[in-house]
């Protein structure tokens, strides 16, 4: 959950009212004391809120989400992480109160959330699905311009559309570079991204080529990619470079379209630059992360930093970070005795 400015917050409220129709989102349904508050309306958070209402009909459940777009029906977007989970209509029908706002602070002693709008919300039990956020990396030349022109398209539909447009304009013999960080937050999605790229080039740019800069130390992703490529019969010219063989990016020059690696200089027509990730901002604010930037939990998702908190979805330290895994965490939370 990223910090909003107040203009953007007003835009979100307007967009949310339009998405919800005449009934509107229950943005004013702040009760003095909510039984369970779920922070984060992604797949895990929305699924947990719905499951809690279905399995515990007497429980008051309130879902806080800053972006109404996340509560719309899932739309398939090329190169975006899959979206899944209940939409706004399903949540409302189940009796889940939805508040469009952003959590900016959390007081464990008072059992209270402070919201961006200036309001406060008390809770009896708290479930957090903070998602993930990009981590700044010490790569020369990689800043805001690079992030815009070389989109990660990792959980962002807008970036996914931008990347799709760039690939559509790729020259017939164009060169695509996919950069994977040293610690990929979603290994399965990283593998799928490489396969997607190779498949697209095989179908639309048979003379094109793909270079994967894999910052990880092992060989697992590369080996699995080769098996998938053989299974699919892909003929794309692919050069998978592991960290020990040129897969580490040292610097970039976006205007020139070049990447400096530990094995020399690469020039690319399109770059899909996936960055390092960590648990979303509110997880750090709430004191739920450890030195790795992720939220350590027990097998049931209860935080080992704060036993009164349950962590859902990708922010968990041990998560496989797939949509299926996020939904399983929601199911476990709804079935747990902490709810």
Image: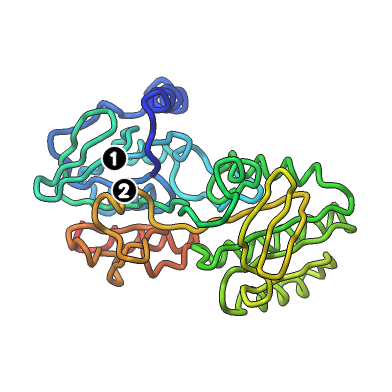
Q: Are marks 1 and 2 in contact (CB under 8 Å)?
A: yes
**Left or right of 270 in this view: 172:** right
Above or below 197: residue 65: above
In the rendered image, which residue does mark 2 sit on?
282
Q: Residue at x 86, y 47 (%)?
A: 171
- Viewer-closest of 245 and 100: 245
| Crowd tier of the residue under label 2, counting other residues whose Cα lies within 10 Å: few below 14, some 14–19, many 20 or above | many
The answer to whether residue 58 is seen in the rendering is: no
Horizontal and vertical percent for residue 44? 39, 53
In the rendered image, which residue does mark 1 sit on?
103
Above or below 278: residue 298: below
**Left or right of 105 in this view: 320:** right
Helix, strand or loop at disc 1?
strand
Horizontal and vertical percent for residue 64? 31, 40
- The quarter of the rendered structure image containing the N terminus is top left
Task: Tell me the CA gap for discs 1 and 2.
Answer: 7 Å
């Amino acid at each position: 959950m990223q910090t909003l400015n107040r203009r953007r917050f007003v835009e979100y409220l307007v967009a949310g009212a339009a998405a919800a129709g005449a009934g509107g989102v229950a943005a004013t349904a702040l009760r003095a004391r909510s039984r369970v508050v779920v922070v984060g309306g992604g797949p895990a958070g929305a699924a947990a809120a719905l499951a809690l209402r279905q399995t515990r009909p007497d429980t008051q459940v309130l879902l806080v989400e800053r972006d109404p777009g996340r509560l719309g029906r899932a739309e398939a977007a090329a190169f975006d992480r899959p979206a899944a989970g209940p939409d706004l209509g399903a949540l409302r029908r189940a009796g889940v109160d939805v508040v469009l706002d952003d959590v900016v602070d959390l007081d464990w002693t008072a059992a209270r959330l402070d919201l961006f709008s200036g309001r406060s919300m008390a809770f009896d039990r708290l479930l957090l699905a903070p998602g993930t956020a990009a981590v700044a990396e010490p790569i020369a030349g990689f800043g805001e311009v690079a992030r815009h022109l070389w989109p990660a398209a990792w959980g962002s539909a807008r970036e996914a559309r931008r990347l799709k447009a760039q690939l559509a304009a790729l020259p017939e013999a164009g060169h695509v570079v996919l950069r994977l960080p040293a610690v990929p937050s979603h290994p399965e999605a990283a593998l799928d991204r490489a396969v997607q790229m190779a498949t697209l080039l095989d179908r639309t740019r048979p003379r094109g080529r793909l270079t994967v800069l894999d910052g990880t130390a092992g060989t697992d992703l590369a080996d699995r990619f080769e098996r998938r490529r053989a299974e699919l019969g892909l003929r794309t010219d692919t050069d998978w470079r592991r960290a020990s063989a040129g897969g580490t990016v040292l610097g970039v020059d976006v205007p020139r379209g070049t990447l400096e690696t530990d094995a020399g200089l690469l020039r690319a027509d399109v770059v899909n630059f996936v960055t390092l990730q960590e648990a979303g901002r509110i997880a750090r604010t709430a004191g739920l992360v450890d030195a790795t930037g992720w939220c350590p939990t027990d097998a049931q998702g209860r935080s080992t930093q704060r036993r009164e908190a349950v962590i859902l979805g990708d922010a968990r330290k041990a998560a496989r970070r797939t949509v299926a895994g996020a939904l399983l965490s929601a199911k476990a939370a709804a079935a747990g005795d902490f709810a």
